[in-house]
Image (cartoon, rainbow, N blue to C red):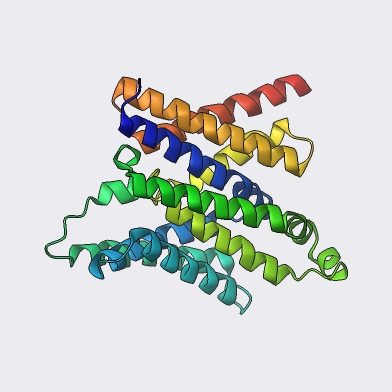
Amino acid sequence: MLDDFLIRATLAGVGVALAAAPLGCFVVWRRMAYFGDATAHAAILGVALSLALSTSVFAGALAVALIMALTVSTLSGRGYAMDTLLGVLAHSALAFGLVAVSFLHGVRVDLNAYLFGDILAVSTTDLAVIWAGAALVGVLTIWRWSALLTATLNPDLAYASGIDPKREQLVLTLGLAIVVAVAIKVVGALLIVALLIIPAASARPLSRTPEAMALIAALIGGLSALAGLRASFLWDTPTGPTIVCVAAVIFLLTNLSARFLRV
């Protein structure tokens, strides 16, 4: 029988994988990897603020990640080069967050847990928050799937269909902020984007429809979480990075297999 902390860790990893996979497909399709990086890095500042104010880490990370995402979305259409803007905001937010943590006196902060994740320390409350966030992201994605897909494929077609691409961008932004907030305890701020992108990129060669890609990405994400947790337990390696390593191996295998089959 598995120990309680392993059961919680398993459920947390699967929950985050299920939340991240569908949104990860849109991140891949829209080429928004750096956007997700900026949002994830900003979450460290949210963690510092929440600890300073003695509030929920999830709430602080979600609020700052959402503010960062909205700021990027707003400024990107006003003459700023997107890559430059994201680079400035992402690394500035991370630096300010790390500096803010250093000012927290009387509060013990394990930065590694927030940078690289500490899935084995997930509590029952954390688990409830992760699955509530995953459920919210799932409902949001299913509800807006058609509109998000249309806006992603062709903004002009979206306008012609009565869909506002900017509104769908905000929906995607909200979903990403929620994923960042729930995933920070599992894989950490520096690896969140990897869990968004790698399963989706692994599913791409195996999929013929967008829906199939999202489902396969969810399966790959869940498998990565389970296998990574098992490997970490056996070899005593950091759990969050191990999960990402397993996902990277699956990415390599699926893409090599697809290439050989085409040949």
Q: Is residue 3 left or right of residue 130?
A: left
Q: Is residue 55 left or right of residue 29?
A: left
* Near-viewer residue (137 or 21): 137
Q: In the rendered image of this protein, does residue 102 appear above or below residue 262?
A: below
Q: Quadrant of residue 152?
A: bottom right
Outermost residue toward the left?
106
Say which quadrant the C terminus sits in. top right
Give me the residue at 29% from left, 47% from top.
Answer: 113
Count numbered badges in the picture.
0
Say which quadrant the N terminus sits in. top left
Query: In x, y percent, where is residue 93?
Result: 38, 66
* Near-viewer residue (245 or 162): 162
Query: In x, y percent, where is residue 188?
Result: 38, 48
Query: In x, y percent, where is residue 163?
Result: 79, 68
Q: In the rendered image of this protein, does residue 196 appear above or below residue 219?
A: below
* Near-viewer residue (13 or 234): 13
Is residue 211 at all visible to an observer of this figure? yes
Outermost residue toward the right?
160
Outermost residue toward the bottom?
78
Give me the residue at 35% from left, 34% from top.
Answer: 239
Give me the residue at 54% from left, 71% from top.
Answer: 70
Query: In x, y percent, where is residue 50?
Result: 30, 66
Q: Quadrant of residue 76?
A: bottom right
Give me the residue at 57% from left, 58% from top.
Answer: 175
Q: In the rendered image of this protein, does residue 247 appear above or below residue 115?
A: above
Is residue 183 at all visible to an observer of this figure? no
Q: Is residue 42 left or right of residue 106?
A: right
